[in-house]
Amino acid sequence: MLLTQQVVLNSRPGKNGEPTPEHFRLEETSLVSDLNDGEVIVRTLYLSVDPYMRCRLNEDSGSDYLAPWQLSECLDGGGIGVVETSHCSTCSEGDVVTSFNWPWQTHAIMKGSGLQKVDLQLTDGHLSYFLGAVGMPGLTALLGVREKGHVTKGANQTMVVSGAAGACGSLAGQIGRLDGCVRVVGICGSDEKCKVLVEDLSFSAAINYRKEDVSAQLKKSCPDGIDVYFDNVGGAISDTVLAQMNKGSHVILCGQISQYNKDVPYPPPLSEKTQEILQSQNITRERFLVLDYMNKSEAALFELSQMIKSSQIKVLETVVNGIENMGVAFCSMMKGSNIGKQIVKISE
Ligand code: NDP
């Protein structure tokens, strides 16, 4: 019998509550040793914590594509691991596999048919990248910019990114620049993040929303106005950005994390003033959902891999160790302690 550690939902923060590590509980359980046909035993290597999980902490996720997590049940999300035993014809021992619904367990029994084998060459051995830059956040950044950004080479465009030092934001800004924006300005929550954006990722400027006057700094760093806004955060920051957008400009409505601990629908309603600005400036603001573009994911993952290998984009990660830290990692990511993709390393 194989013993495994797992993280279950201990309690819910409630619709308007802030998640804390106490909402998660570590348990030990055993896996049955007899596998059914089609099943595999996997050892987990890395797990992902992501903002959308905040919805799954509520009794009603408020979304038609996300099921709420259940109390005392094992949680799940993006994960990657290695097949240790296989009773599945499409998986072999030693295969590295990934899934959007990986249980938060050190070892797990999974159906082989629900796993995707990864091409190790795509990340030159950086397995955690499959949960970040060459995974869902990378796709979100690339396809978000391409599908909703209207970035055009030679058009002298300025892009602003909020949540700019996070998993999606840090990539979106770099992709915007590669695709032709002449100026890319990031908004984020610390001086350290600002420094990384400008010095390591070649953003034109970065604004610390926690201590700077965002409106004044945007005016300074975007003298020609804003043409593309990759919005990860919503709320007051986005109202400030929208007020400085040019006529006919475009918002990539990626996420609204500043509102996730509030009991509001998604996307949260805009103020009347901001709605008027959108209308009078003829600004497009269409919701973007990466899951709607999975038919483009293979080509996009390959392109992301090429961009990384050729050093056209840099990848940032914050890695914590140990399954016991899943809850801590999720909560600290929600509060901004991560630079780049927040990853939890479960085993070597
Ligand atoms: P990040 O790596 O960006 O981590 C979240 C970041 O959000 C934190 O680091 C923090 O950075 C910032 N943040 C938290 N609270 C606030 C707040 N009140 N105001 C401003 N910033 C805040 O996460 P991801 O890159 O995974 O996700 C970014 C966004 O993209 C989220 O809104 C997410 O829901 C969305 N998303 C959407 C997808 C889609 O298909 N549309 C797919 C994947 C993600 P800081 O220090 O700057 O505050």
Image (spheres, rainbow, N blue to C red):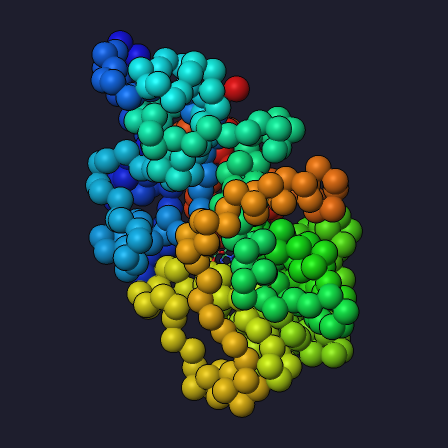
- Indicate the quadrant where residue 39 lies: top left
Residue 166 place in picture, x, y as percent: 57, 51
Residue 70 place in picture, x, y as percent: 22, 42
Residue 224 to residue 319: above or below: below
The quadrant the N terminus occupies is: top left
User: For this rendering, which residue is in front, 48 or 64?
Assistant: 64
311 relative position to 137: left or right? right
Residue 159 place in picture, x, y as percent: 66, 67
Count the labels in the image: 0
Query: Residue at coordinates 77% horizontally, 69% vertically from top-left?
Result: 154
Query: Residue at coordinates 39% horizontally, 68% vertically from top-left?
Result: 267
Residue 283 to residue 196: above or below: below
106 relative position to 238: left or right? left
Residue 31 to residue 128: above or below: above
Residue 290 to residue 96: above or below: below
Query: Residue at coordinates 32% horizontally, 68% vertically from top-left?
Result: 265
Residue 220 place in picture, x, y as percent: 75, 75
Does residue 149 appear anywhere in the picture?
yes
User: For this rendering, which residue is in front, 260 or 48?
Assistant: 48
Query: Residue at coordinates 73% horizontally, 66% vertically from top-left?
Result: 153
Does residue 195 appear anywhere in the picture?
no
332 relative position to 327: left or right? right
- Indicate the quadrant where residue 105 lies: top left
